[in-house]
Amino acid sequence: MRGDPPATVDYLRAYYRGVFFATVALKGRLAKLDPPCREAVREVGRYQTMIKGFADALEQTVELHRQRGSSPA
């Protein structure tokens, strides 16, 4: 056991936001390259979809905790 405390919800929100915007920048740069990079652009788009799914699930968790009157860790 490492002893690090679990990540807070606020940290995770900022983390996923940062990861998403990093992929936006990467996708923009790849899109400016030659047509062979189109598959890489699509792959980054799939990664963005996955990240958005994680962020949405996090927000749903926060909402469930609000409804129950508890706070997420």
Image (cartoon, helix red, strand yellow):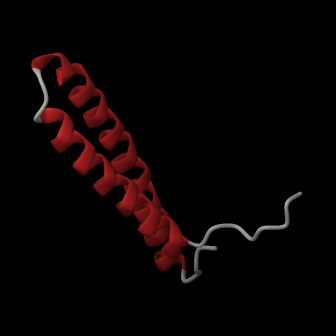
- Specify the farthest residue to the top: 36
Q: Please state if 11 lies on the left or on the right of 52 as rendered.
A: right
Q: Nearer the viewer, residue 36 or 66?
A: 36
Give the number of marks.
Answer: 0
Residue 30 at what x, y percent from top left?
20, 34
> As displayed, is residue 31 above or below residue 63?
above
Q: Residue at x 85, y 67 (%)?
A: 3
Name the quadrant containing residue 5: bottom right
Q: Is residue 5 above or below residue 29?
A: below
**Residue at 17%, 16% in the rendered image:** 36
Task: Note whether 21 is above or below 7 in the view shown.
Answer: above
Give the residue at the far right of this rendering: 1
Asked which quadrant contains residue 33, the reply is top left
Residue 2 is situated, as x and y percent measured from the top left of the image, at: 85, 60
Q: Residue furthest bottom?
A: 69
Q: Quadrant of the N terminus?
A: bottom right
Task: State the image quarter where residue 40 is shown.
Answer: top left
Which quadrant holds the C terminus?
A: bottom right
Q: Residue 61 versus residue 29: which sits nearer the camera?
A: 29
Q: For the point 70% across and 67% down, which residue is it? A: 6
Q: Is residue 47 left or right of residue 71?
A: left
Residue 45, horizontal then vertical, whole percent: 25, 35
Q: Position of residue 48 (x, y in %)?
A: 31, 43
Seen in the image, is 62 located left or right of residue 20? Answer: right
